[in-house]
Image (cartoon, helix red, strand yellow):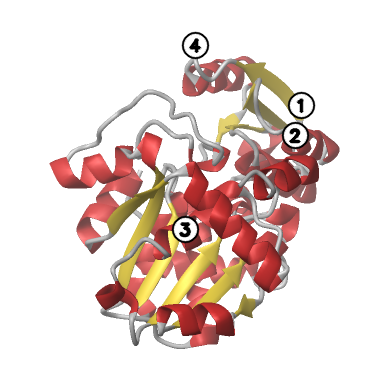
Amino acid sequence: MDVPTAADVASAADLLAGVAHRTPVMTSRTLDERLQAQVFFKCENFQRMGAFKFRGGYNAISRLTEAEKSGGVVAFSSGNHAQAIALAAQLHGVRATIVMPHDAPEVKVAATAGYGADIVRYDRYTEDRREVAARVAGERGAVLIPPYNHPQVIAGQGTAAKELIEDAGPLDLLVAPLGGGGLLGGTALAAAEWSPGCQVIGVEPETGNDGQLSLQRGEIVTIETPRTIADGTQTTELGPLTFAILRDTGAEVVTVTDDQIVEAMRFLAERMKLVIEPSGASSLAGLLTLAADTVIGKRIGVILSGGNVDLTRFAHLVQSQ
């Protein structure tokens, strides 16, 4: 597969217009004063199915031929890509099967099933989800759409950053969560094209810094499945496409602890009245770890990638400290 470009992001934006929500950009005077900067939050928790993943999922399914659509699609995901593919498939009248880990948040499992998808469960700690998904796709004659290492998925995810730059203006710094790199890869493409000179930073869990290690070593590093509350970033490696984009655009990566993620979730809930899932709040957590000279006086974009979190779990987390 070819590495996507900014032109692919622009094409995805045209395709998604009127289908995906143009999510709001919000600010916090409290945070601006604290950081001595201007921070603009792209609130993808208000996206269809509650996360940015709808953008890439819909874009990918839209590009399938009618013959490919007739066989259905298969995806593997802990939750948000699952819901995105399930909803996008429903909108296209395409059958969807989603391979999900046994410990995926039940709110995400229920939502995926609610969009009409068949669900196949697996153990993320003992089974390879790609092997399971490939087997299921082969058995059903379906097209496999991976969660991040796919050019049209990456291009679709990049439309969130494109919109943020259009609505907030040029940025000096843009921060996004990093799992497999679909969102960060698309973000890096958008920033390079529509806000030249903008520094792009991805945020990973401290226990799962495969992306950081990969960029440091100049090759894809594979790790064990990380244990973290941020289920959307529980990936073990970047994809060849996302790695190439992050390497070539000069993106950087920082890591955060679960406690730092929870503190970010609490701030977003208390000060901005936003319910953000752990993975989504990791971008703010990462911003808060940066050195003062990196942020003071800067115009900063932060992508809050989603809000699909069980409210009981959310309440437990934000009250836990």
Q: What amino acid is at disc 4?
A: Thr
The picture places residue 141, in percent across and down from the top left corner, at 62, 22
The residue at which mark 4 appears reads as 126
Crowding at mark 2 (Cα within 10 Å: few <14, some 14-19, many 20+):
some
Q: Nearer the viewer, mark 4 or mark 1?
A: 4
Question: In the drawing, does residue 42 fall left or right of residue 284?
Answer: right
Residue at 30% over, 28% down:
222
Residue mark closest to the camera, 3 vs 1: 3
Mark sitting earlier along the chain (1/2): 2
Q: Earlier in the sequence, mark 4 or mark 1?
A: 1
Q: Is residue 206 above or below residue 10?
A: above
> Which mark, residue 118?
1
Numbered label tally: 4
Tag 1 near tag 2, CB within 8 Å: yes
- Closer to the chain start, of discs 4 and 2, is 2
Q: Residues under labels 3 and 2: Cα distance? A: 38 Å
Whole-angstrom CA distance, mark 4 to mark 1, is 22 Å
Q: Identify the residue position indicated by label 2 in the image.
A: 95
Q: Which numbered tag is attached to residue 285?
A: 3
Can the viewer see residue 111?
yes
Disc 4: CA contacts within 10 A as few (<14), some (14-19) or many (>=20):
few
Q: Where 67 falls versus 99 (above or below)? A: below
User: Residue drawn 23% across and 41% down?
Assistant: 214
Name the image quarter holding residue 122: top right
Q: Are marks 4 and 1 in contact (CB under 8 Å)?
A: no
226 displayed left or right of 273: left
Q: CA distance from mark 1 to mark 2?
A: 8 Å
Crowd band around label 1 with a 10 angstrom C-alpha radius: few (<14), some (14–19), many (20+): some
Mark 3: give few (<14), some (14-19) or many (20+) Cα within 10 Å. Answer: many
